[in-house]
Image: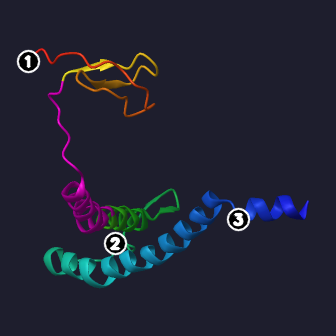
Amino acid sequence: MLKEFREFILRGNLVDLAVAVVIGTAFTAVVTSLVANVITPLVAAIGGEPDFSGLLFTINGSRFLYGEFVNALLAFAIIAAVVFFFVIKPVNALMARFQPDTATDVATRPCPHCISDIPLTASRCAFCTSHVSPLPDPA
């Protein structure tokens, strides 16, 4: 039983998940600090009011604190914008820079062994490595 537990704990995806949670927690602290200390004061300087927690209305003696909801909604929108513009866009641009260019107008045919698409002039399948007889390029 201990051997199975050790195998479970040392499984690659479990360790990757643990690292992702730790990095995610640290990243959350960085993004929250950026929003609270830089972005929210900028919004307050432009809009004049950074805190809506005092907004409420009353119906039959029940208080509805919709200001807290507005604060949470604005925090979510600001955090989503910060993550998108400062993380997602730069990472996508970086990934696009290092992604190899692929030819798109190459005529293909199915491999007779694994049914993957291979170029007409291929003599070996890139997926299953089987030898195939090349066909003449119709171009």
Q: Nearer the viewer, residue 125 or 57?
A: 125
Q: Amino acid at mark 3?
A: Leu
Q: Residue at x 31, y 26 (%)?
A: 123
Residue under numbered circle 3? 10
Residue under numbered circle 1? 139
Is residue 90 in the magenta section? Answer: yes
Q: Residues within 10 Å of mark 2 (few under 14, many from 20)?
A: some
**How far across and down, in percent of the image, does residue 111 sit?**
38, 20
Q: Is residue 48 left or right of residue 5?
A: left
Q: Is the C-beta separation of discs 3 and 1 under 8 Å?
A: no
* Secondary structure beneath label 3: loop
* Secondary structure beneath label 1: loop
The quadrant the C terminus occupies is top left
Vertical side of 66 occupied by 31: above or below: below
Q: Residue at x 49, y 73 (%)?
A: 23
From the image, give the main secondary structure of the stretch colored magenta.
Answer: helix
CA gap, disc 3 and disc 1: 53 Å
Of the two numbered discs 2 and 3 in the rendering, the one whose residue sits closer to the viewer? 3
Q: Amino acid at mark 1?
A: Ala
Q: Amino acid at mark 2?
A: Phe
CA gap, disc 1 and disc 2: 67 Å
Q: Residues within 10 Å of mark 1 (few under 14, many from 20)?
A: few
Checking the image for residue 52, the label placed there is 2
Q: Residue at x 23, y 16 (%)?
A: 135
Outermost residue to the right: 1
Over which residues does the magenta segment extend? 80-106
Rendering quarter of residue 30: bottom left
CA gap, disc 2 and disc 3: 47 Å
Q: How is the image coloured?
A: rainbow
**How far across and down, in percent of the image, does residue 128 sit?**
45, 30
Rendering quarter of residue 132: top left
Q: Nearer the viewer, residue 139 or 17?
A: 139
